[in-house]
Image (cartoon, helix red, strand yellow):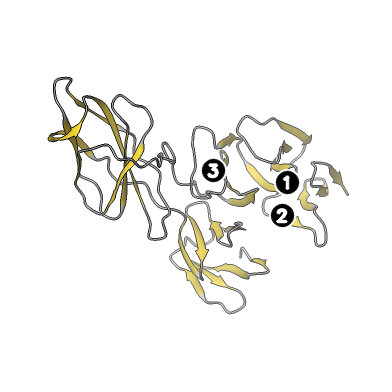
């Protein structure tokens, strides 16, 4: 089941294995049998797929977890007696970094104080293994800047660095899996039983849970178009207008009936999409106009 294809390749699920089509080479094993998979090709050529439980990407013929996981622990931050940091409160956060430079979401900042009558440094311990970036605010500051990149599990910051790289992933989490995966104008979209999630632009593995979510239960269809996104449940069909999706965009109801799950298809030699509804085949245009055939 779950046959999918584009000009770069084709895949299907057989039992607990994700395979190439037609060769049948196993790309991913150990899947729960019977769970349908959804696929979407991102702008950089990576193929993202999910079966509602896991979200992975196929890169170079290998299926791997989509993105870098969050650090599995918050570091322990204490004041060091040596160092040249001026007095004040400092905040510290870390991220994990993959071999290709991709960065994880950040740990929540931990505060530490250097007393008013002293100078010192910051000891950071209990960090996970692997390459990490350490971000620190200035004295009584609010913006975190990169202080170091290290593979050590403990590190001391004695002086403020001159680097101006600001922490980009504060509060970010990995993209949630879903039973639908799509791409819309350089954002990755996934949908589960409670809503639609979208990534940061050009960062398909970074999800901001504070603004990257559209609540809607029972989603059966998500189809991005040039002028917006079609979203449907079994009961209603909606249009989320805009070239870029956002959580505060208004969903306009188009039809008082929904779409059958897994039935949408792109129409050849056209910018339109079609799907099955309880009242027959529906065609949707790139600008949000629908027609029941």
The residue at the far front in this view is 162
Q: Is residue 150 visible?
A: yes
Q: Point out which mark residue 200 bears.
A: 3
Percent coordinates x, y for residue 261 in the rendering: 67, 50
Dot 2 falls on a residue whose secondary structure is loop
Percent coordinates x, y for residue 256 in the rendering: 78, 35
Frontmost of labels 1 and 3 is 3
Percent coordinates x, y for residue 276 in the rendering: 77, 51
Closest to the observer, 171 or 111: 111
Q: Point out which mark residue 259 bears.
A: 1
Dot 1 falls on a residue whose secondary structure is loop
User: Position of 241 compared to 69: left or right?
Assistant: right
The residue at the far bottom in this view is 23
Q: Are marks 2 and 1 in contact (CB under 8 Å)?
A: yes
Residue depicted at x 76% and y 39% = 257
Closest to the observer, 291 or 135: 135
Closest to the observer, 171 or 78: 78
Q: Is residue 78 visible?
A: no
The residue at the far left in this view is 81
Report the residue marked by disc 2: 263
Q: Quadrant of the N terminus?
A: bottom right
């Amino acid at each position: 089941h779950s046959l999918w294809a584009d000009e770069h390749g084709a895949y299907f699920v057989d039992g607990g294995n994700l395979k190439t089509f037609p060769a049948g080479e196993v790309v991913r094993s150990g899947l729960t049998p019977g769970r349908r998979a959804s696929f979407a090709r991102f702008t950089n050529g990576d193929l993202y797929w999910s079966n509602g439980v896991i979200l992975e990407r196929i890169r170079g013929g290998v299926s791997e977890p989509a993105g870098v996981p969050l650090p599995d622990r918050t570091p322990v931050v204490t004041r060091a007696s040596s160092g040249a940091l001026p007095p004040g409160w400092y905040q510290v956060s870390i991220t994990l970094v993959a071999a290709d430079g991709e960065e994880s979401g950040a740990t929540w900042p931990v505060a530490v104080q250097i007393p008013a009558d002293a100078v010192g440094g910051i000891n950071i311990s209990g960090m996970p293994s692997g390459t990490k970036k350490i971000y620190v605010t200035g004295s009584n500051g609010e913006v975190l800047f990169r202080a170091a990149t290290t593979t050590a599990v403990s590190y001391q910051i004695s002086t403020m660095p001159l680097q101006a790289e600001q922490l980009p992933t504060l509060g970010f989490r990995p993209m949630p899996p879903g039973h639908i995966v799509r791409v819309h104008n350089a954002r990755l979209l996934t949908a589960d039983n409670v809503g639609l999630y979208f990534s940061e632009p050009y960062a398909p593995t970074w999800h901001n849970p504070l603004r990257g979510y559209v609540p809607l239960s029972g989603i059966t269809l998500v189809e991005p178009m040039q002028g917006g996104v079609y979203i449907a449940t079994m009961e209603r069909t909606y249009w989320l207008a805009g070239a870029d999706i956002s959580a505060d965009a208004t969903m306009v109801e188009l039809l008082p009936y929904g779409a059958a799950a897994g039935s949408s298809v792109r129409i050849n030699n056209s910018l339109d999409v079609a799907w099955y509804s309880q009242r027959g085949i529906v065609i949707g245009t790139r600008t949000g106009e629908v027609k029941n055939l």
